Amino acid sequence: LRPRAPGDGRGGDDAASAMSHLKRLAKAVESFLHPSNGGYWTRRLTQLLSSLCLHLLDRVRREKMSDPGPDLKLQPADVTAVVNIVMPLALQGLYSKNASAVSQVCVALKDLALLDADTLLPALLERVYGALTTLTEVHQASAALEALAAIIY
């Protein structure tokens, strides 16, 4: 996800290409994670989402422990860009009718909060506030509370 130095033989468009592909993937699966579009794919997609967040968090933690070098290390802007791509999927999947999918999304939200709380928390708190104050969609309240509990715990 990091651009390479000019002349290293790998090109400087690697990071842009990776982000471009991640954006395209997110756009492609967005409708499949909509709460009213549930099926056998929902659990698999939320597992993919959760795994992506977990592996990104693992990489960031590894890089803090041992510096891989400036041209290989993810910068905060890179992490924020990934969080901005993945966050809408997680927030949309939060209100799925599949309980295991909601649990996977909560794990992904926790990892995203650990990666970039400043980006995630305002959007999540806005959704949680809306879910807790609505009278017509009661099932959203339990999912919102589960997400808050996952992030806090």
Image (tube, rainbow, N blue to C red):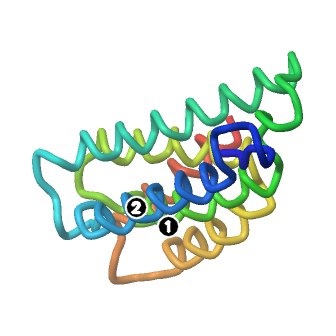
Q: Which residue lies at the image location 22% right of the left edge and 49% below the top edge? A: 42
Question: Dot 2, how many residues are within 10 Å of its Cα: few (below 14), some (14-19), or many (20+)?
Answer: some
- Quadrant, the N terminus: top right
Residue 14: image x %, image y %? 60, 49
Q: Amino acid at mark 1?
A: Pro
| Discs 1/2, front | 2
**Where 138 sits versus 25, above or below?**
below
Q: Compare residues 28 and 143 and report the one nearer the observer.
A: 28
- What distance separates the C-alpha of mark 1 from that of mark 2? 9 Å
Q: Which residue lies at the image location 39% right of the left edge and 64% below the top edge? A: 24
Q: Compare residues 92 and 142 and report the one nearer the observer.
A: 92
Find numbered disc 2 in the image and state the secondary structure of the residue it sits on: helix
Q: Which residue is mark 2?
A: 26
The quarter of the displayed image where residue 129 is located: bottom right
Q: Which mark is residue 88?
A: 1
**Where 90 sits versus 48, above or below?**
below
Q: Which residue lies at the image location 70% right of the left edge and 42% below the top edge? A: 152
Spot the residue most to the top. Answer: 66
Residue 58: image x %, image y %? 66, 26
**Where 18 sits versus 87, above or below?**
above
Q: Compare residues 24 and 52 and report the one nearer the observer.
A: 24
The quarter of the displayed image where residue 13 is located: bottom right
Residue 97: image x %, image y %? 24, 57
Q: Is residue 44 left or right of residue 77?
A: left
Q: Which residue lies at the image location 37% right of the left edge and 58% below the top edge? A: 25
Residue 146: image x %, image y %? 50, 48
Q: Is residue 33 left or right of residue 111?
A: left
Find numbered disc 1 in the image and state the secondary structure of the residue it sits on: helix
